[in-house]
Image (cartoon, helix red, strand yellow):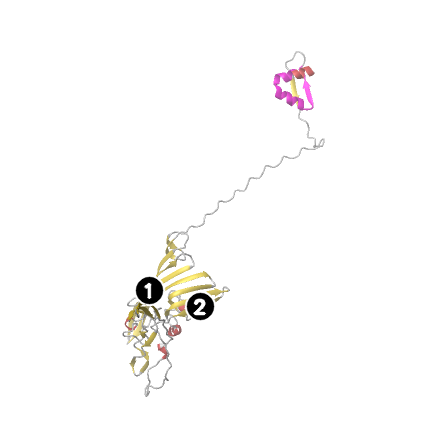
Amino acid sequence: MRGQLLAVARLIGPAIAALIAAATPVHAQTDPPGGGAEEVMVTPPPDPGAAAGAPAPPPAPPPAPAEKKAPATPAEKKPPAGYVPGTGFVIQSDDAAYRLRVGLQAAYKFEPVYQDGDFQDRNTFFVLRPIMSGNFLREWIHFWTSFEFAANPPYLLDSYIEIFPWKEFGLRIGQQFTPYDRHEYFGPQEILFPEWAPVSEYFWPGRDKGVTAMGTLAEQLEYWLGVYSGTPLRQFNAGAFLGPVVGSDGLESGNGYLRGCFISSTDVAIARTIKLGAGRSLQLRADVFNLFNQAGIIARNTTMNLTSPSDPATVTNLPFDASGAPVAARARPNGAGFGVATDYQPPRSIQLQARFAF
């Protein structure tokens, strides 16, 4: 039997011989006499940890396929130019740090008026305001410039810069509407009636140049605090005055009830003396008057013109029309309206001197 196994091993090669030597048990079956070649059957050894007669363990489940991650959605890129919902027509950089927005505020008012037994239709643009606004350097640094074209001639309405890094605090610098009350912050497209509230319009000091600090605290409390230079067109409340009534001697009002604002100016001088010998010298001197060019108002028009002696309340020389727009002919010192500044302190001037002494 052993000789037969060795013969088969020589025939099938060294690799098979190693397999036969390692496998147990080995059963050899010999063909009957006169038959053909011998056949060797190899049975692998049983698992040593399996109990005799125990059922085979179930096959391991195939590994679960790995979850495919959804591709990351790229950030929505803002268009460089065109219409942006909620903003309007803009031209901007890719990161929106620089943005230019153009717009138009307009309101058309139709007023049918019954007068002298006849109807008259008054069709006019209540406001017609082209606007240029946007931001630069940062999204929280804004600018705004608007004009009023409904008046003749047109004039600059607002022009300011807003620095608003936090919602709790921000600054507005430039020509702006003064925060007399919340009603004045409504644009013409936001008011519920054709005009702003008459009481607010009566006491509102108008637009002015200055600085406004504002913000929202605790998501509920809004505040405004401003410092302004004072408009030259409203040096005092012209509506607080009435003309003399019948029988008046013109002395009903006291003296000194109107006082001008405090004014100041800064003057500086610099001089250099050069000694020339023999008791001679040369002095060079420069004087600057009103160094910071402060425009202090020193005179106002205090003359009020009325329609007639029987109507002491209708003033005909106010610097504003019925819609609140300045009247150009009464907005200048020459021909100034009631309450308009007429004279200012001297502007900055420079004086140069050379003095020779001997």
Q: Position of residue 356 (x, y in %)?
A: 28, 70
Most extreme residue toward the top is 34
Kindly identify the amino acid type of the residue bearing the numbered disc 1: Phe
Q: State the predominant SS element of the stretch in magenta.
A: helix
Pick the residue in front: 354 or 220: 354
Q: Write down the residue under mark 2.
A: 224
Q: Position of residue 187 (x, y in %)?
A: 38, 65
Q: Quadrant of the C terminus?
A: bottom left
Q: Write down the residue under mark 1.
A: 147
Quadrant of the rendered image containing residue 274: bottom left
Q: Position of residue 322 (x, y in %)?
A: 32, 72
Q: Could you tell whether 31 is left or right of 309 in the image?
A: right
Evaluate if marks 2 and 1 touch, with contact meaning CB atoms under 8 Å apart.
Answer: no
* Residue appearing at x 62%, y 20% in the figure: 14
221 shown above or below 59? below
Pick the residue in front: 332 or 320: 332
Quadrant of the rendered image containing residue 271: bottom left
* Residue appearing at x 33%, y 64% in the figure: 147
* Residue appearing at x 34%, y 63% in the figure: 146
Q: Does the magenta portion include 27?
A: yes
Kindly identify the amino acid type of the residue bearing the numbered disc 2: Trp
Q: Does the magenta portion include 237?
A: no
Q: Position of residue 48 (x, y in %)?
A: 70, 30
- Please give the range of residues in magenta: 7-31
165 shown above or below 205? above
